[in-house]
Image (cartoon, helix red, strand yellow):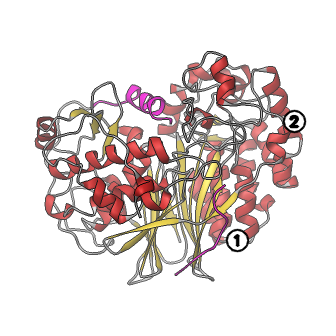
């Protein structure tokens, strides 16, 4: 494999964690213990009578789509069957997801993508994230009395990057015009679609906040309430926005009437957008970053994405024989929780906009740095305080993936951050703007401090794995700060324990959360045994039972290195689906 050349890519812990804790679905009682599995040395063998899988993998010979909503997945499959490639299908799926999962993503948000181009055998990385307004700064908010970034509202707006990202992807790798790719989403927006069950529950949870903004309520609360499961929802305003983009391309969004309406709304509601913020927006092709975990090369997008956090966790955990410790054993979970704490201390110090700061990215993901940090992990006791290292001295989101018949592959993640982002629909455009600006810090001198025309730290991170230079796995895990933790857990399930893709996503997860308690809180799903929980508590961890969407939403497609077939898995915590032909 040859790595594609590209230009260099030009703290929100508490708020996101608080949202998760508030939404915990606490489980009563404990689960039965899980049978341990030995590592298979590959990622595609299904152990007999596995306790982890809810269903079989989807396996298909030609093309495959994995997405968090079935209608969107089917649209992607239609594109592939009609002759489009993986990039065409990925953009079509993303556009439909912006309609059917509006609380998670949409044209008011940002995206990152990893693209494996089969013809050149290269992996490309796209950063399609937006910047803060030119007219806003840390000092602006401090003068208004803010000590930290607000969680929603116009002050959290950054320029949405998704539409420009779509154009970049299609211009470089696509085969279909943008109008053809957006046609299915436009039809669903005009004619309506039935709201699926999990999405309906999450939609309703945001109803009170949406009702505070008239245009948000008019768009997303038809009849004064959130749609129920099976209700047909239409969004003609979004259809009009999509139609304008289909006809005029990305300029219709950033240099046309859509931008003018957003700016006018911003000026009347305390925001800081100007037309210049939209006119000079650009996406950036960047060099993907990588580490090797037990013979597998794992690839991520560099900062401002949080992708390097997954690589740092992998480096730390590679020093332990996880398979020998046992799947979801107290020993393995303790080591993972301690590794996550170390990585997060570095995240809050060193992960920011690479265009605005010199960042020690290569040092952070190096093996020597991991070895030095690993020495700080006590195998018998949970740490209550963790400090960042010194790498300079060392040498609410959707995820989708598509693989086509030529084995082009797209790993794409797109988000408006919080549920319905900023909660604000700016006028009659039909979509909410993201609250990605809430990820900035107001701490003076911080690398991630709010500044004009600066990108915020981003939780989003699509993943990709190659083996022996060949594409192996396109995957991702949704869920804000859960994403790096989820990347480690599903990769360990596949690589260390030989689970297939469906089992790897179904298996019980752990999430470490910042909290008022020293050392934070471990949220564990019911599939983790009572004995493991008791042992984690003995070692000093505060442990709660939890489950549901806060544990992330996973999709994955693997190219079987022995048969060439496509294998897919999707997360039971979402309404998702894998489809192939």
Please tell me which residue is depicted at 50% across the width and 32% down the height of the picture.
202
Q: Which residues are magenta?
A: 1-26
**In the rendered image, the vertical position of residue 115 relative to residue 272, given as above or below:** below
Q: Residue 279: in sight, yes or no?
A: yes
- Give the percent coordinates (x, y) of residue 521: 29, 33
- SS at badge 1: helix
- Measure how far apart labels 2 and 1 are at the Cα level: 30 Å
- Give the percent coordinates (x, y) of residue 167: 75, 59
- SS at badge 2: helix
List the residue tagged with mark 2. Answer: 260
- Give the percent coordinates (x, y) of residue 159: 72, 41
Question: Which callout, 2 or 1, points at the residue further toward the start of the chain?
Answer: 1
Using the rendered view, name the quadrant where residue 24 is placed: top left
Please tell me which residue is depicted at 15% across the width and 41% down the height of the picture.
381
Q: Is residue 419 magenta?
A: no
- Residue 442 image label: none
List the residue tagged with mark 1. Answer: 173
Q: Is residue 17 magenta?
A: yes
**In the rendered image, the vertical position of residue 296 relative to residue 267, given as above or below:** below
Which is nearer the eye, 452 or 227?
452
């Amino acid at each position: 494999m040859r790595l594609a050349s590209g230009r260099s890519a030009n703290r929100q812990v508490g708020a996101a964690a608080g949202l998760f804790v508030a939404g915990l679905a606490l489980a009563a009682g404990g689960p039965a213990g899980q049978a341990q599995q030995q590592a298979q040395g590959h990622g595609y063998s299904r152990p007999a009578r596995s306790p982890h899988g809810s269903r079989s993998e989807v396996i298909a010979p030609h093309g495959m789509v994995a997405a968090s909503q079935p209608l969107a997945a089917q649209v992607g499959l239609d594109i592939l069957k009609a002759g489009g490639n993986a990039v065409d299908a990925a953009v079509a799926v993303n556009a439909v997801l912006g309609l059917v999962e509006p609380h998670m993503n949409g044209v008011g948000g940002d995206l990152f993508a990893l693209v494996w181009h089969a013809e050149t055998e290269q992996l490309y990385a796209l950063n399609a994230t937006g910047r803060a307004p030119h007219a806003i700064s840390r000092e602006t908010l401090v003068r208004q009395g803010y000590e930290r970034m607000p969680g929603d509202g116009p002050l959290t707006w950054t320029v949405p990057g998704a539409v420009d990202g779509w154009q970049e992807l299609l211009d470089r790798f696509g085969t279909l015009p943008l109008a053809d790719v957006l046609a299915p989403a436009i039809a669903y927006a005009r004619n309506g679609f039935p709201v699926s069950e999990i999405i309906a529950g999450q939609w309703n949870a945001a109803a009170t906040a949406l009702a505070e903004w008239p245009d948000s309520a008019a768009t997303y609360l038809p009849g004064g309430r959130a749609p129920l499961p099976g209700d047909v929802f239409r969004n003609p305003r979004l259809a009009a926005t999509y139609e304008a983009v289909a006809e005029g391309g990305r300029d219709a969004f950033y240099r046309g009437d859509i931008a003018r309406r957003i700016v006018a709304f911003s000026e009347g509601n305390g925001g800081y957008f100007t037309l210049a913020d939209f006119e000079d927006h650009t996406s950036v092709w960047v060099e993907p970053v990588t580490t090797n975990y037990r013979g597998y090369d794992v690839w991520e997008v560099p900062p401002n994405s949080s992708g390097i956090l997954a690589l740092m966790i992998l480096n730390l955990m590679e020093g332990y024989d996880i398979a020998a410790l046992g799947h979801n054993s107290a020993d393995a979970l303790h080591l993972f929780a301690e590794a996550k704490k170390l990585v997060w201390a570095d995240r809050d110090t060193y992960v920011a906009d690479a265009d605005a700061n010199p960042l020690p990215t290569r040092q952070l993901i190096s093996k020597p740095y991991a070895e030095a940090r690993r020495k700080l992990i006590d195998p018998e006791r949970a740490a209550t305080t963790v400090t960042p290292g010194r790498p300079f001295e060392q040498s609410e989101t959707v995820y989708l993936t598509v693989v086509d018949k030529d084995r082009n592959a797209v790993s794409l993640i797109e988000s408006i951050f919080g549920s319905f982002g900023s909660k604000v629909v700016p006028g009659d455009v039909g979509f909410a703007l993201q609250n990605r600006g809430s990820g900035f810090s107001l701490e003076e001198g911080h690398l991630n401090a709010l500044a004009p025309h600066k990108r915020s730290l981003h939780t989003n991170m699509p993943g990709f794995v190659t083996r022996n230079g060949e594409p192996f796995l396109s995957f991702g895990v949704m869920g804000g700060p859960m994403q790096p933790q989820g990347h480690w857990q599903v990769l360990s399930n596949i690589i260390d324990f030989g689970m297939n893709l469906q089992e790897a996503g179904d298996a019980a997860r752990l999430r470490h959360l910042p909290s008022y308690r020293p050392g934070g809180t471990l949220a564990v799903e019911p599939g983790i045994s009572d004995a493991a929980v008791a042992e984690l508590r003995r070692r000093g961890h505060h442990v709660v039972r939890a489950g549901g969407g806060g544990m992330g939403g996973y999709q994955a497609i693997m190219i079987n290195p022995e048969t060439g077939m496509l294998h897919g898995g999707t997360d039971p915590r979402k309404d998702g689906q894998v489809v192939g032909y």
